[in-house]
Amino acid sequence: MNDDYMSDINNAEITQRTLRPQEPAAETEMQQEVVENIQPATDVLEAVCCPFCGEMMDADADYCESCHRYVNGNVCSYCGTALSGEEAYCSECGNPRGGLVCPACHTMNDFAFCKQCGTPLTDEAKAMVAEMMQHPDFIELKAAVEQMSNLENCLPYTSERDIVCKQMNEKLRERVLTLLAKDRGEENPEVRPLPETRMSEEQLNAKKEQVIEKVMELLEKLALVKAESPVKARNYCMATKPAGVRLAWVCNYKHAMHSSPCGCAKPHLGGKWVILGRGTKGNIKDDN
């Protein structure tokens, strides 16, 4: 064989190795374990376009978080009843499909509670609020929120002079009431001290933290784990919202912070109310 012939054979072998990769080496035990632990993605959801704004959204969502519109025309947004045609009113709850105007703040709403002020707008919503008012956890929650509000309006002692003035005023009050009681013929009048409403700044802050923890604990107890439909979820969560405290609703769908469940595409996946601190309003992805 001449050198040219051997050169052609070598070139052919190189070409075959380039076009046909070599067989892979045997997998290591670690590689096999990784492959065995990989689970197929079974929860991938189909995406569709919002009929109003064209943005992509999950096929099973009934609310577009881009244009803030209710998109499921086959289900009543107030009670969750299936709608069969183009009827103007729901056959079950009788509410109009075009929206309800809140009588308190005049906001147009697609849902049973006003997304702006929380006013119940339908008979079902009002009944849910009345029922929640009898719930032991909600009764305790309302009392804790009221206590938190009172603490926010409480002025702490800012100096030793404030404490001395308070003690002097209390002694003066006790003396005046004692003299008035003796003028009425009471021999040994008893003057009860006023409830202590003022405290040091450290005591006040500690008291606030204690009450806030109580409110958060009760909000957690009333949190929605899961619901049968988005409509029922929105109604329940809005009925459990206490007045008198700044709250946001954190959904389980995207773990986003909404001003209410009315701004979430999938509130039926669960969520809870959380207390808003100062300066956190900018974190809300709400439904305005």
Image (cartoon, grey):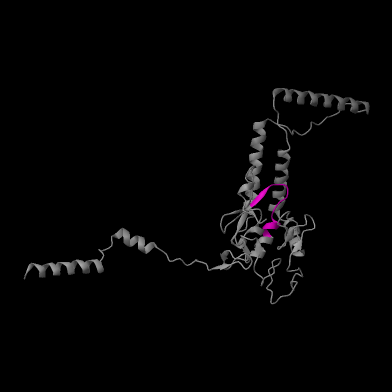
Q: Position of residue 28 (x, y in %)?
A: 28, 60
Instruction: Locate residue 47: give its quadrant.
Output: bottom right
Residue 187 sits above or below residue 76 on the image: above
Q: Nearer the viewer, residue 160 or 251?
A: 251
Q: Residue at x 72, y 49 (%)?
A: 142
Q: Position of residue 157 (x, y in %)?
A: 71, 28
* The residue positioned farthest toward the bottom in the image shown: 85
Q: Residue at x 40, y 63 (%)?
A: 38
Q: Residue at x 72, y 54 (%)?
A: 116
Residue 159 sits above or below residue 195 on the image: above
244 falls in the magenta region? yes
* The residue positioned farthest toward the right in the image shown: 184
In the rendered image, is residue 188 in sight?
no
56 falls in the magenta region? no
Q: Nearer the viewer, residue 170 or 97?
A: 97
* The residue positioned farthest toward the left in the image shown: 1
Quadrant of the frame with the N terminus? bottom left
Image-based side of 27 in relation to 167, left or right = left
In the rendered image, is residue 159 in sight?
yes
Instruction: Locate residue 207: give its quadrant.
Output: top right
Image-based side of 154 in relation to 9, left or right = right
Q: Position of residue 170 (x, y in %)?
A: 79, 26
Where are the magenta residues, as a range?
Answer: 236-248
Q: Nearer the viewer, residue 251 or 57?
A: 57
Instruction: Locate residue 16: give its quadrant.
Output: bottom left
Quadrant of the frame with the C terminus? bottom right
